């Protein structure tokens, strides 16, 4: 990493320090933690786009699947949930998997023609009807189990740290299913398909209450070890002495310490992923992926299985996004499917990759930290800036309109930054070598 890149990272670090000194360290650390998680997502997208040229706009769906994994793995089992319909759900899932396996074998073993088409339609239709016949009564019984407070299966009550890799596995499984059907499409069609599938994932999470309470949300998720609760810290004499030595009151100090621990954990995960990504990028495998990205026809002529490699990188990148999604949900302590939207969890991540530098892992991290800071700080500073601008104006429709438009300043600011980077550094702040 050269002096220019070090200077860029130092400049971004200065933004977080200035936020802490001029506003509050609680705000600065909150933004830092979200920026670190966004950087991990940007690394996953950079692998798909920067390494292989895959235009995935379904990042939101893989993030949500990572959050769902936290609920399924670490939340406590719901009293009466499994006895009400748990076996039925498992049986229905087994029937669904068996239907897919049977349809796949039928497609491989039968000769192309009308009979194969009829057989596939019969197997898939019959399997779907059987699947719903078993699943619907089971889910109805689960959702009828004290729906205002419970109404779901709950989780396994396992440690939260275990849910992070499970989130990656769940996202990887979904990526495999999507990739097997969509990776053969042209890049623009792939973007449309992945965006639509992400919306389907969110819709399922919102409407299937038996799985994670849908729009009723799951709250009170446990924290990962070794993150303590603020109340526990405020009862510790050792912590009270530490907070007093730094000039913090116990409430503020406990919040800052918790966020510092999260930042340390997220930073370690980020460094591990960067290290592995750099090893992969500079290996023969990485050179092969870039060769496929630059010229698929030539790579195929050299004996490379382009479709298989595209599926491989699509799964790996989606798994990284799923891990970040699980980490985000465990930090929030709740799963709220209604908060997942394409602007925040898809297109903002793409802006991070573009601004930082597509094809460069360090560029993706820089873009994640910079745009992550900008996205959240403008939300805080926007009303203050607009208030200062309109302070000398007479009351009226124009002043009211400007004050009300402060909430849109983040979009305006983000657009200006993106245009400036594309104009003066079209390959990103840290471009690919």
Image (tube, helix red, strand yellow):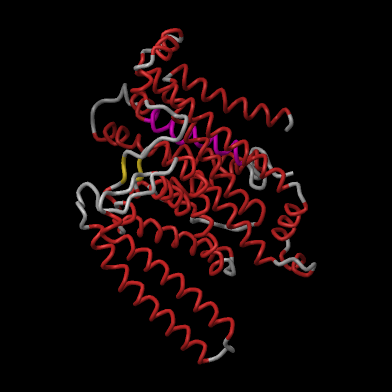
Q: Residue at x 63, y 50 (%)?
A: 47
User: What span is in magenta?
Assistant: 364-382
Is 367 inside the magenta-drawn segment?
yes
Which quadrant holds residue 369?
Answer: top right
Is residue 364 depicted above or below 384 in this figure?
Answer: below
Q: Nearer the viewer, residue 4 or 81?
A: 81
Quadrant showing the C terminus:
top right
Picture coordinates of residue 289, whole percent (x, y): 71, 56
Q: Residue at x 69, y 66 (%)?
A: 306
Q: Nearer the viewer, residue 395 or 322?
A: 322
Is 396 inside the magenta-drawn segment?
no
- Residue 202 shows in this picture: yes
Quadrant showing the N terminus:
top right
Picture coordinates of residue 38, whole percent (x, y): 51, 40
Q: Is 3 displayed left or right of 334 in the figure? A: right
Picture coordinates of residue 122, whole percent (x, y): 42, 85
Is residue 422 depicted above or below 390 in this figure?
Answer: below
Q: Main secondary structure of the magenta part?
A: helix
Picture coordinates of residue 299, whole percent (x, y): 76, 65
């Amino acid at each position: 990493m050269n002096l220019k890149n070090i200077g860029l990272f130092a400049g971004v670090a200065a933004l977080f320090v200035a936020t802490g000194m001029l506003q509050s360290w609680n705000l600065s650390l909150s933004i830092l933690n979200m920026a670190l998680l966004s950087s991990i997502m940007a690394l996953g997208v950079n692998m798909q786009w920067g390494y292989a040229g895959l235009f995935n706009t379904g990042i939101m769906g893989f993030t949500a699947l990572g959050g769902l994994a936290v609920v399924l793995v670490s939340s406590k089992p719901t009293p009466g949930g499994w006895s009400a319909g748990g076996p039925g759900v498992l049986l229905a899932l087994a029937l669904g998997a068996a239907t897919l396996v049977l349809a796949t074998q039928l497609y491989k073993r039968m000769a192309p023609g009308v009979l194969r088409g009829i057989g596939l339609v019969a197997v898939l239709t019959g399997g779907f009807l059987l699947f719903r016949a078993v699943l619907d009564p089971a889910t109805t019984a689960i959702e009828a189990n004290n729906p205002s407070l419970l109404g779901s299966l709950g989780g396994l009550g396992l440690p939260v740290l275990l849910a992070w890799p499970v989130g990656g596995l769940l996202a990887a499984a979904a990526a495999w299913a999507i990739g097997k059907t969509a990776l053969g499409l042209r890049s623009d069609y792939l973007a449309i398909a992945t965006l639509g599938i992400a919306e389907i994932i969110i819709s399922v999470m919102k409407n299937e209450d038996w799985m994670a309470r849908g729009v009723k949300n799951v709250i009170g998720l446990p924290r990962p070890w070794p993150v303590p609760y603020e109340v526990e810290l405020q009862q510790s004499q050792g912590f009270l002495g530490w907070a007093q030595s730094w000039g913090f009151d116990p409430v503020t100090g406990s919040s800052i310490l918790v966020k510092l621990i999260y930042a340390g954990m997220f930073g370690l995960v980020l460094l591990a992923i960067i290290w592995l990504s750099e090893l992969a990028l500079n290996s023969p495998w990485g050179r092969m992926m870039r060769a496929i990205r630059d010229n698929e026809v030539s790579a195929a002529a050299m004996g490379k299985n382009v479709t298989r490699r595209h599926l491989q990188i699509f799964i790996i990148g989606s798994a990284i996004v799923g891990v970040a999604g699980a980490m985000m949900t465990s930090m929030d302590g709740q799963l709220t499917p209604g908060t997942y939207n394409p602007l925040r969890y898809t297109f903002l991540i793409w802006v991070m990759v573009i601004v930082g530098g597509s094809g460069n892992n360090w560029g993706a991290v820089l873009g994640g930290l910079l745009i992550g800071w900008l996205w959240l700080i403008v939300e805080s500073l926007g009303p203050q800036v607009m208030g200062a601008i309109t302070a000398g104006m007479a009351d009226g429709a124009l002043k009211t309109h400007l004050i009300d438009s402060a909430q849109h300043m983040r979009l305006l600011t983000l657009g200006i930054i993106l245009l400036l980077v594309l104009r003066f550094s079209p390959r990103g702040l840290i471009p690919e070598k």
